[in-house]
Structure formats: C-alpha cells, structure tokens
Image (tube, rainbow, N blue to C red):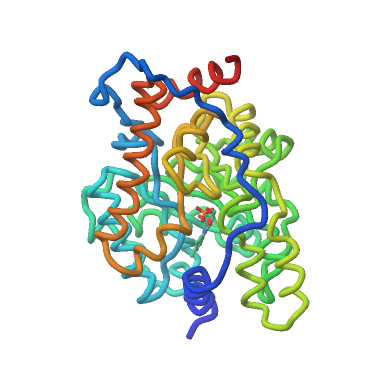
Amino acid sequence: MQPTRRRKDEHIEICLTRPVGSSVSTGLDAVRFEHLALPEIDLDDVDLDTTVLGQRLRAPLLLGAMTGGSTRARRINERLARAAERLGLGMALGSQRAMIEDPRQTGSFRVRDAAPELPLLVGNIGAVQLRKGVAPETLRQAVRDAGADALAFHVNPLQEALQPEGDTCFRGLERLLREAIPRVGVPCIVKEVGAGISPATARRLAALPLAGVEAAGVGGTSWARVEAHRAGGAPAAVAGERLAGWGVPTAESIVACRRAFGRRLVVGSGGIRTGRDVAAAIALGADACALAGPLLGPAQDSEAAVVRALEAILLELRVVMFCTGCRRPVELRRAAARAGRS
Ligand SMILES: Cc1cc2nc3c(=O)[nH]c(=O)nc-3n(C[C@H](O)[C@H](O)[C@H](O)COP(=O)(O)O)c2cc1C
C-alpha cells in the first residue's frame, strides 16, 4: 500500500481504538454564562443560521478535517458528508495529499457525489507540501476535483516532528503561503491540528491574504499522542506522550485568532465536544466551530450515528442560548461578558 494511504488508515485505527486525548484542558470551561430563569425569549426564537466562507449553514458547526485517500476513508467521508448535508452543516476533508500523489484516490474526497446539497466543503493540504514542489495550480486542480468551496492549509510542526516519515523543514513557509494563496482560486484558511495558534503566530498569519483561520488548540485529539502510538518502542513513543499537552489551549488560541483576524473568519476547534463548548468558543470570538475526533467512531458505524451525535450538540447549544436569552450565536459574546461582570 502507498505510504500516505497506509498512514491515513493507521491514524483512523489509532484514533478509534487508543486513548488520544491531550493531557490539558481546552480552557473553554472557564467561560461563564449567567443562567437566566427569566430569559424573555421563546426557545423557537433561537436561530443558529450562520454564514461561513460565503455559504449559509443551519448552525455554526463544521465536521472537522479528518480523512480521505483509502477505501475505508471513502466510506467514512461519505457518511460524514450525508450527515452534514442532512443537518445543513459544513464539512472539511482530510489532507488531499493522497489524491495528489495517486489520482485513483480522488473518489474518496468527492463527497458531493454522495451529498450533492452539502452547503460547504473545505479542502485540505499540509502547508509544508508547498516546499515539496506541490504547485498552487496543482492545489487549484485538487480543490476543483474534490468540488471544494475553500482550502485549508494545515500547519502541524509538532506532529511532523514526531512522525518517522515527517516533513520537518518548515523554512520559508510564510513566503510560500503568501505566494500560493491568491493562486488557489478559492478562499483559503490556515489551521493547526490540535496544538493551537499563539498571538504572535496569529498576527503573522493575519498578514497573509487568508479568508480566515482555524484555531485547533490543545485540549482535544493530541497528534503527539497519536504519533506516540505509531512509534512503537522508539523515542517518539515517550516524547509524544510527554508532549500530549504541548501547545496553545483552544480558548487562548481562539482569542488570539480573533484579535489578529478582525472581521475575517475564525473557526474554533480542538476539543470541541459539547454544545456548551461551541457556545463558549463563540463567546470568545469564534464564528463557528469544528469537531473531528468525536465523529470518527459514529462515522465508522453509520450516517445515522453521526447525525445523532451532532443533534445532541446542536440541541445543547440551542438550550444554552435559550437559557442565556440569546437569539443569535453572536449574542453569546455579550452573554458571557455579562456573566463575567455579575
Ligand atoms: C482521524 C483524524 C484525521 C485527521 N486528519 C487531518 C488532516 O488530514 N488534515 C488536517 O488539517 N487535520 C486533520 N485532523 C485534525 C483535526 O482536523 C483537528 O484539528 C484535531 O483533531 C483537533 O480537533 P478534535 O479535538 O475535535 O479532534 C485529523 C483528526 C482526526 C481525528
């Protein structure tokens, strides 16, 4: 089997069967909301509609970037896409490197064949691939072939450094991103994969022609830990476990991204597990949230299992908004500020 494909399947297997949570909290629990016993709104007034990258979603939620590039990944992606379509949510693809290296894998990324009404599809590639000769025109074609509306460049130095086959030269990526982004043909964002974005990095990213950023902070799936499981007895097994809490917690990463990105898109992610987490991330400045790891198990089962998992989160978000008197997600920012003062 081709190495990229094999690695993708190993990642899925490890995330499904081993403990991969990071050793620190997202920080989202520290966001306080005041419970209003007199919210003065009707639960039916709560309206979760949100526009992300120009596409209208029925709630501020995306199914986060995970996979593609193998038969197993194709099944998972199709179930995720159908669930996202059913609920009117956005979906992000896993790294499209597999289809760039082997065009026969393109079908596993073409999820709109299974879910033609999917409102938003975000493509994905490691920024480090720009150093390895993947041209912006190749990315433009990969986005087109997958039918994606936008492209996320992932930056994952922690993960690459712990991977035996990792691409560890990140020199000059800022310049390569600046040159590539305008040539991809769709709006681009940058995302981490669970080690977050610091204030200084957020400011550097904000100077690029990006449509937005995804925080992907520490507190959820730890890619140091995933790679530790893959390392067997090698030093990376020990180092990866020890670094399972390395990085910028999700709450801090969201605040840093919002400050730096002004009115551009900020997606809150990394350890988003509940409707309250979504509410807290939005209160801190996210426009929408993405969750990945928790949807893998349900996607392995069925589309219905993914829908059930997401419906519970959406109901919880709706109830939190009702009990804080918020009709629209953006009002959660004032609700949290009010709770901070009381
Ligand atoms: C099985 C799996 C595969 C992933 N593959 C990718 C990927 O190819 N590209 C990417 O940008 N992020 C990838 N991620 C990272 C997620 O998009 C996300 O940033 C990270 O897991 C933290 O979110 P979580 O705590 O909700 O899982 C993957 C996550 C999982 C669980």
**Percent x, y for residue 258?**
59, 29
Say if 119 sits above or below 330 in the image.
below
**Percent x, y for residue 242?**
75, 64
Residue 21 location, quadrant: bottom right
Quadrant containing the C terminus in the rendered view: top right
Q: In this view, does 58 lie to the left or right of 243?
A: left
Say if 337 sits above or below 269 in the image.
above
Q: Which residue is drawn at 50% across and 35% down?
A: 211
Q: Residue at x 60, y 68 (%)?
A: 226
Please state which of residues 283 and 256 is positioned toward the viewer in this rendering.
Answer: 283
Q: In this view, does 2 lie to the left or right of 247?
A: left
**Percent x, y for residue 6?**
50, 79
Q: Residue at x 61, y 45 (%)?
A: 26
Residue 340 location, quadrant: top right
**Percent x, y for residue 152?**
50, 49
Q: In this view, does 242 lie to the left or right of 139?
A: right
Q: In this view, does 295 lie to the left or right of 15?
A: left
Please state which of residues 126 and 291 is positioned toward the viewer in this rendering.
Answer: 291
Q: Residue at x 39, y 42 (%)?
A: 61
Please state which of residues 26 and 121 is positioned toward the viewer in this rendering.
Answer: 26
Say if 226 sits above or below 254 in the image.
below
